[in-house]
Image (tube, helix red, strand yellow):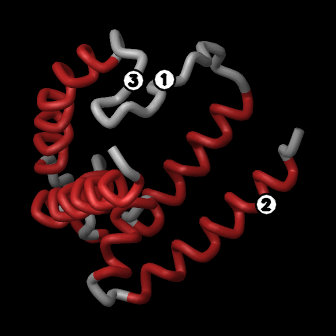
Amino acid sequence: MNQLAKNILALGFGLLFGAGLLVSGMANPAKVIGFLDVFGTWDPSLAFVMVGAIGVAILPFSLAKRQAHTLMGEAFSLPTATVIDARLIIGAMLFGVGWGLVGICPAPAISLVGLGQLQSLYFMLPMLITMSLHDILNKG
């Protein structure tokens, strides 16, 4: 399969993923914060979205784990790290705090910018800067 076809498929799957985020409410910061507010006015609806997503993904991931290549012929590998170290814990905590403070994470932020909600750039720009800083500090 040529690169143009792969890019078109990637765009299509990305649009489908973004539409799923929007339809499910995962791109709505108020809904996400309501889900995270377990000691206040908790909104459990996103738990059903997550359980549904896991249910849909179990079979394809189970099948994919046994493959060396994707359907498009690209090399396929899953992460192999099994160590839970300070870097993982600190990164997870930073991600969780950021998600809890603003109610969005990277994929919904991109969806929101695409919808013209440019205030999500206040989240995305620092995220991109810190990702770049991480790459610079961890070269080699």
Report x, y in % for residue 64: 30, 20
Which amino acid type is shown beneath numbered disc 2? Leu
Residue 55, numbered label: none
Which amino acid type is shown beneath numbered disc 3? His
Query: Dot 3, crowdedness within 10 Å: few (<14), some or many (≥20)?
Result: few
Q: Nearer the viewer, mark 1 or mark 3?
A: 3
Q: Earlier in the sequence, mark 3 or mark 2?
A: 3
| Up-down relation of residue 74 to residue 25 (above or below) | above
- Quadrant where the C terminus sits is top right
Q: Nearer the viewer, residue 62 or 93?
A: 62
Residue 26 visible in the picture: no
At a point 33% along the width and 44% down the height, the residue shown is 1
Where is mark 2, residue-wise?
Answer: 133
Which amino acid type is shown beneath numbered disc 1? Ser
Report x, y in % for residue 137: 87, 51
How much space separates mark 1 and mark 3, taking CA atoms?
8 Å
How much space separates mark 3 and mark 2, taking CA atoms?
32 Å
Question: The residue tagged with tag 3: helix, strand or loop?
Answer: loop
Where is mark 3, residue-wise?
Answer: 69
Question: The residue tagged with tag 1: helix, strand or loop?
Answer: loop
Q: Is residue 132 left or right of residue 19?
A: right
At a point 37% along the width and 81% down the height, the residue shown is 113
Q: Is residue 94 left or right of residue 68?
A: right
Report x, y in % for residue 43: 16, 54
Q: Is residue 139 left or right of residue 106?
A: right
Where is mark 1, residue-wise?
Answer: 77
Q: Earlier in the sequence, mark 1 or mark 3?
A: 3
Residue 14 appears in which quarter of the rendering?
A: bottom left
